[in-house]
Amino acid sequence: MLRFHFIKLTSLFPPKPSPFPLRSQMGSFSTSTSSSSKLLFRQLFEKESSTYTYLLADSSHPDKPALLIDPVDRTVDRDLTLIKELGLKLVYAMNTHVHADHVTGTGQIKGKVPDVKSVISKASGAKADLHVVPGDKIHFGNLFLEVRATPGHTAGCITYVTGDGPDQPQPRMAFTGDVLLIRACGRTDFQGGSSEQLYKSIHSQIFTLPKDTLIYPAHDYKGFTVSTVGEELQYNPRLTKDEETFKNIMANLNLSYPKMIDVAVPANLVCGIQSETN
C-alpha cells in the first residue's frame, strides 16, 4: 500500500465551518474558520466548465504545505497567485478522475512549479507522478486525505476524504468529483461509466460517512457550493430511489455529447500537458 509521510497531530480542530460559503470578488469560496484553524481551505470556481477547484493547506505547519484538487488549465495563474499570496508551498496537484469537460491544469502547474507532484488513481490509466489506490493516505503537513474508490461516472473515479481522527478537520469533508453532485450525480454513458457501479459506489463509500460530512463536488450548475451526506441521503432526487429506479433514470437522461470530450480526455490522460490545444 502506498504511504506518504505521517506526522502525529497534537491539537484538536476548531468548530465546524458554515455550510453556506459566500462568493468573493476573485471567484474564490471559503468556509469561515477560526484563526487557530489548522486547515486553510478555499473553494475556487471556473465559470466556463462550472468546475470547482479546491485548495487545502496545513497553515499550522512551518512549511504550510498545500494541495489542489481538480485544477483547471484556464485558472492556473489565478490559483498559483493565490497560493503565493497566502505563503503556501504547493506539494500536490490532484484529480478525482479523467475529466471530459475541461483540461486539467496539472500539467501547467508542474511546468511552473516543478517540485509539485501530480496525483490520480491507478485505475484511471492516466499519467501522473503518483498513482493512488483505495486506502492510501495523502499527507500534507499534519493533515491527510484518504482515498476511496468511487467508480461509476468513469472507471477510475476516486473520492478524497479528510482524515478520520480527533486532530483532523471536523466535520469531515468529501471531495467527490463528478460522482456525487449536489442533488444530482455524474452521467454514466461514457468512459467506462456504469449506473449500477455508481449507485453502489455512492451508497457504500460516501453515504456511509457521518451525516454531517461536507460534500464538495467538482461541478455545480445551479449556484450551490456545498452539501452534506445527510442532505443528499434525504433530498437527492436520484439517489434516494432504489437501484432499479436509479438505473432507469440514468438510462433516460438523453444528455448531449460533451463538447470538450475529444480534447479534454486525451489531454487529461497525459496530465493535461496538451492543454495548449484547448
Image (cartoon, rainbow, N blue to C red):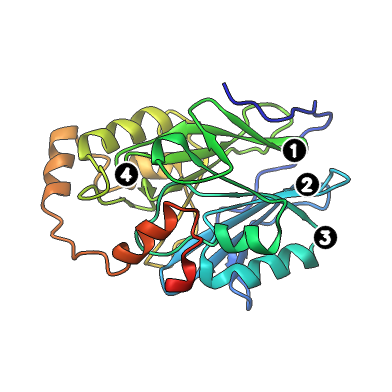
**Between tags 4 and 2, which lies in front?**
4
What's the mark number on residue 13? 1
Sequence order check, earlier mark of 4 and 2: 2
Q: Which amino acid does label 3 sit on?
A: Gly
Q: Give the Cα distance between marks 2 and 3.
A: 16 Å
Q: Mark 3: which secondary structure?
A: loop
C-beta proximity under 8 Å, tags 2 and 1: yes
Q: In this view, does 201 lie above or below 19?
A: above
Q: Which residue is drawn at 30% across and 45% down?
A: 153
Sequence order check, earlier mark of 2 and 1: 1
Q: Mark 4: which secondary structure?
A: loop
Alpha-carbon neighbours of circle 3 within 10 Å: few (<14), some, or many (≥20)? some
What's the mark number on residue 87? 3
Q: For this view, does 17 lie left or right of residue 181?
A: right
Give the residue number, with chain letter if any, for mark 4.
154
Sequence order check, earlier mark of 3 and 1: 1
